[in-house]
Image (spheres, rainbow, N blue to C red):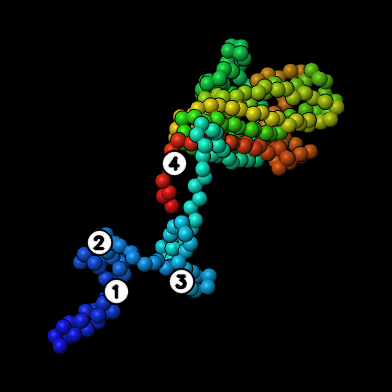
Amino acid sequence: MKNIFSTILLASGLMLSAQVGINTESPKAKLDVNGDLNLRDKIAVLDVTDNTLSLGNNDQLLVSQGEGYPPIWKTLRIPEYEPNKFYLIFNNSFSDKIGVTFSYAEQPATTTSKAATFTKGANFSSLSGFKKINGLSQKISVFSTESKAYFQFETVVQANFAANGTTDTSIDYACGIFVDDKLINLRQSNLKASSAQFPFLTHNQIGFVTNLSKGDHTVSVACSRLASYGNSTNRNLAIGINTNNNINDFIAQSSLKVEVYEVPQVFNPIIK
């Protein structure tokens, strides 16, 4: 009779208690187990779509949906990698409608040749007159010591030249692709006046770099006005933005596509 009474008291205590602890006097959940847990049968979670219990499928994992929501079953798919082969690990694209503009006063007075100035690995801070297109500055991550990163930059360049300008009226400009503020690719071009006012052109360039160090890196694009000819000294140059309304910021916007190929070496643990 005494044992029956003790059992009734224990059961009543469990029902009245908001939290139950096993091997702990201060449970932090409705059921708090401080120690090993050995499950011999099954785990079921609530499927909120039809209010039934779901046992999941073979090779599925329980994944949290955050506080206040029941966990759900998810299938973890890990691709099979062949050794010493490159695989596309990162692929993304970015855009910018703000662009950069240059007046004649912002044209740097260079004292060295372009060949000496524009060298691979040159630091952004050493390149006078370059402005970054802010929306294209983005972080990328590299997980292997063997990698190849490709960058494709496209934009529109416009000057507010008057109509019927001679071909001697033009502006030289250059755009560079940088990784961690180090120049990895540069293209120089020239925008000429023509019989039409406010001429513009499409600028494309592709950059490439190998074996970046493992970790996070920042890719960015910057451009500069290099030289002016004819009566262009009182004309503005715009890259990634329009100078006049014969085109708009949608047409003139810049884009950058980034692809990182790696020979997989380390697989990161799943954190979320």
Q: For mark 4, does the 10 Å Cα neighbourhood hold few (<14), some (14 to 19), or many (20 or more) residues?
A: few
* Front position in the image: 120 or 124: 120
Which residue is identified by label 1? 18
Q: Amino acid at mark 2?
A: Asn
Q: Earlier in the sequence, mark 1 or mark 2?
A: 1
Which residue is identified by label 2? 34
How far, Cα to Cα, is label 3 from label 1? Answer: 23 Å
Which residue is identified by label 3? 53
| SS assignment at label 2 | loop
Which residue is identified by label 4? 267
Q: Earlier in the sequence, mark 4 or mark 1?
A: 1
Assess whether mark 4 and mark 3 are in contact (beta carbons under 8 angstroms).
no
Residue 216 in view: no
Pick the quarter of the image with the N terminus: bottom left
Assess whether mark 2 and mark 1 are in contact (beta carbons under 8 angstroms).
no
Give the residue at x 76% y 18%. Answer: 230
